[in-house]
Image (cartoon, rainbow, N blue to C red):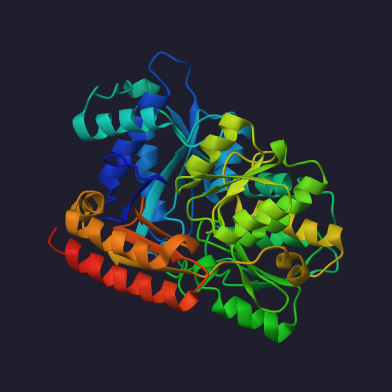
């Protein structure tokens, strides 16, 4: 991780770590780095989620960008993947999304996409950090008559919805689905999209007030969606996170389906249609071991990367692969998108159901999950580094691995977006896994408290 950028952009509490001043500096630096002085004037797009702080940060970013002579087009409330798509459609130099994804309302973040819709390379992020934090090199400010201007897009939502709608030729007519928008970005797009495809939509948590994003809803809190699907006997429940780049679902029996199982269902469908490049799916070290078994049983290759969609995509681009993702529901379909897109994934999954002529609960039986347990420990920045160097912590982890044995595994990693260390255990014996992960987390938390 860099000094400002984590694995998914810049994150912080709004008006605390992520202030107007910092946003202005980032906008100014990003425009300078991405559009060197002397180039013809170009524009940068800014989209946002529904947080109360998003409009404030949009104004600050736009001011910084305009101050160095670059135009801004404000997209309004849109999903993160809409920015990645529209930056190409609108021929912009870059796109910026203001969102803290699945985090609660007090947080916000800044994600930057290049002109091709991909997240910025590490080298560009480091150059932006150097300008913001070290004033190296100083920003080239525009003359008074060369300042950028701000325009408001009137077409962003419709252009994005039309694009995702046209990624399938399958009608969803006859499907009854509940859609949990997390009071976030998909509140602006989901009903329009899925209704246009023919689905009968029951809309939930699509009334954002600036503070209720992800609050007891969305892909991180799926209990209400599950109960609604069961009560109303629906075919599926769709759940997005705050910026709609992640998607999880509930099947017709009310069973919560995570990203690994969604990947299994979609991988089989893609393989049957010849759409799975090199017959390979990319996951991460956190992908359930049951997915490995599923791939072995179905003649599909599996590759695991570090945690983070940027690493999944990096490998997909390197090997020309078409499909990959994370257990969290951040799935990437390179045929259609340059980043994870929750609504696109949902459209493709529902299309798979229609093509198969089966219920979702029947399709998800292709993969059996191994029991997993995970505990998050809140830590300081210094403690994040200490998990790799502290001898006491290493001894605790070695003991945990010994207890799990060869039939399971232990994964310990610092979060790239939050002040957390995640400890995950996986294996055949669920009771042992739960006991080991809780015991290990308690010991590690105590050892890291010294930092």
The residue drawn where x is 64% and y is 76% is 255
Q: In this view, does 353 lie to the left or right of 401?
A: right
Q: Check the image and report above or below for 186 versus 162.
A: below
Q: Which of 265 and 207 is in front in this view?
A: 265
Determine which quarter of the picture holds residue 248. bottom right
Q: Nearer the viewer, residue 268 or 183?
A: 268
Residue 420 appears at what percent x and percent y? 31, 60
Residue 285 appears at what percent x and percent y? 48, 51
Residue 151 appears at what percent x and percent y? 51, 38
For the C terminus, give its image quadrant: bottom left
Determine which quarter of the picture holds residue 54. bottom left
The residue drawn where x is 45% and y is 49% is 307
Residue 347 visible in rendering? no
Residue found at the far bottom of this picture: 231
Q: Is residue 143 left or right of residue 429?
A: left
For the N terminus, give its image quadrant: top left
Residue 14 appears at what percent x and percent y? 31, 56
């Amino acid at each position: 991780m860099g000094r400002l950028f984590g694995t998914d952009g810049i994150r912080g509490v709004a008006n605390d770590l992520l202030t107007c001043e910092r946003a202005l500096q980032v906008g100014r630096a990003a425009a300078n780095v991405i559009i060197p002085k002397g180039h013809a004037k170009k524009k940068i797009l800014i989209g946002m989620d529904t947080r109360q702080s998003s409009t404030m940060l949009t104004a600050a970013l736009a001011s910084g960008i305009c101050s160095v002579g670059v135009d801004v087009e404000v997209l309004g409330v849109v999903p993160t993947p809409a920015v990645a798509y529209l930056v190409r459609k609108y021929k912009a130099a870059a796109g910026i999304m203001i969102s803290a994804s699945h985090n609660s309302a007090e947080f916000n973040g800044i994600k930057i996409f290049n002109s091709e819709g991909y997240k910025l390379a590490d080298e560009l992020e480091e150059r932006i950090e150097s300008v913001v934090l070290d004033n190296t090199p100083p920003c080239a400010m525009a003359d008074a008559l060369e300042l950028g201007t701000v325009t408001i897009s009137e077409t962003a939502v419709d252009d994005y919805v039309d694009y995702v709608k046209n990624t399938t030729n399958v009608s969803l007519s006859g499907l009854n689905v509940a859609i949990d928008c997390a009071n976030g970005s998909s509140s602006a797009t989901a009903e329009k999209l899925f209704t246009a495809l023919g689905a009968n939509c029951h809309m939930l948590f699509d009334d954002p007030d600036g503070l209720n994003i992800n609050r007891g809803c969305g892909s991180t809190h799926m209990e209400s969606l599950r109960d609604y699907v069961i009560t109303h006997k629906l075919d599926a429940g769709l759940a997005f996170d705050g910026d709609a780049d992640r998607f999880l679902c509930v099947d017709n029996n009310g069973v919560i389906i995570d990203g690994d199982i969604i990947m299994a269902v979609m991988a089989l469908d893609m393989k049957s249609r010849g759409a799975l490049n090199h017959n390979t799916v990319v996951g991460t070290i956190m992908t359930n071991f049951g997915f490995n078994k599923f791939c072995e049983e179905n003649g599909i290759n599996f590759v695991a990367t570090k945690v983070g969609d940027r690493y999944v995509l990096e490998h997909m681009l390197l090997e020309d692969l078409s499909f990959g993702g994370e257990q969290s529901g951040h799935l990437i379909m390179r045929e259609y998108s340059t980043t994870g897109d929750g609504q696109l994934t949902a459209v493709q999954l529902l299309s798979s159901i229609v093509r198969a002529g089966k219920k979702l609960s029947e399709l998800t039986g292709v993969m059996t999950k191994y029991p997993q347990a995970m505990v998050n420990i809140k830590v300081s920045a210094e403690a994040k580094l200490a998990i790799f160097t502290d001898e006491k912590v290493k001894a605790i982890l070695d003991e945990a691995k010994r207890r799990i044995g060869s039939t399971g595994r232990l994964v310990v990693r610092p979060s790239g977006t939050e002040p957390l260390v995640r400890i995950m255990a996986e294996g055949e014996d669920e009771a042992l896994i739960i006991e080991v992960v809780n015991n290990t987390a308690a010991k590690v938390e105590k050892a890291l408290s010294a930092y």
